[in-house]
Image (cartoon, grey):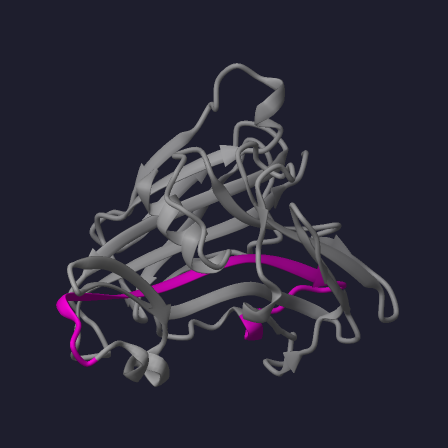
Amino acid sequence: MKRTLVLAAALAAALPFSALAHKAWLLPSQTVIAGNAPWITVDGAVSNDLFYFNHVPLRLESVVVTAPDGTGVQPQNGATGKFRSVFDVELKQQGTYRIASVHDGLSATYEVNGERKRWRGNAASLAELPKDAKNLQVSESVGRVETFVTNGAPNATALKPTGKGIELIALAHPNDLFAGEEATFRVLVDGQPKPGLEFEIVRGATRYRNAQDEIKVTSDAQGEIKVTWPEAGMYWLETGSEDNRTTVKQAARRRLSYVATLEVLPQ
């Protein structure tokens, strides 16, 4: 679960890596809806129990909403409280919306006058680091927490890969998942299929059962995972990895993380 902590820290703005149970997520009020410009509400948090607000909020600055035609949509009525953030989205178009919290940043540790320091920022603010810093270690992190909502008939324009970091592409549709059926997803890293990525999949309402009942799958040689949903509900999917494909020369390693919230409907 260390990958989850990395993601939580990056997206929730300076969280300590203090507990292995913390999970970052976005939770829409509905994933399938039909109407003339209906609204949905989305909660965002990092929590111990899935989809319950009991730790810290996700920050709204990184929220990106993509409309069914591929254009950006501005979230409305955003607010951040002690344990969660919340915002609304007006679904003016028919089709599928991609709602994500996206992080692309840098972190560093260094010493000044024998004192250990930590820093977070991006490539543009890298010059903030002291010129006399010693034992400087810089790492890059790219993370995505996302969910999907469809108004009326689904489409796939908003689901096109961005080509950066880890992404999960449903070979059918992410709002067309049913209990007892198998779903296939293709896992991409920088737009290319990625074998060997381990996923943890957990159904919500974990606080009401003794076991997490997690499903563990690994992407195959084609970069695909297959999941048979045991029952209906909201599911949390998480994976992560590290590589040296950094975009900043000072960074030696890149940490990648991905989370999706998917609703599985009853038959």
For the residue pair 21 and 159, the one nearer the viewer reads as 21
Q: Decide if residue 165 is in sight here.
A: no
Q: Residue 254 occupies which quadrant of the picture?
A: bottom left
**Is residue 13 left or right of 190 when viewed as pictured?**
right
Point out the image quarter for the N terminus: top left
**Is residue 141 left or right of 11 when viewed as pictured?**
left
Q: Residue 227 occupies which quadrant of the picture?
A: top left
Main SS category, magenta section: strand
Where residue 65 appears, as percent x and y from the top left, is 62, 71
- Per the rendered image, the range of residues in magenta is 131-158
Point out the image quarter for the C terminus: top right
114 shown above or below 229: below
For the residue pair 29 and 2, the one nearer the viewer reads as 2
Q: Residue furthest front?
A: 113
Where residue 144 appears, as percent x and y from the top left, is 45, 61
Magenta-colored stretch includes residue 77: no
9 shown above or below 217: below
For the residue pair 83 and 72, the one nearer the viewer reads as 83
3 shown above or below 149: above
**Point 26% across, 53% down: residue:** 241
Q: Residue 21 occupies which quadrant of the picture?
A: top left
**Point 31% across, 59% down: residue:** 256
**Point 27% across, 60% down: residue:** 117
Q: Residue furthest left?
A: 135
Q: Residue furthest right?
A: 36
Magenta-colored stretch includes residue 152: yes
Where residue 52 appears, as percent x and y from the top left, is 64, 36
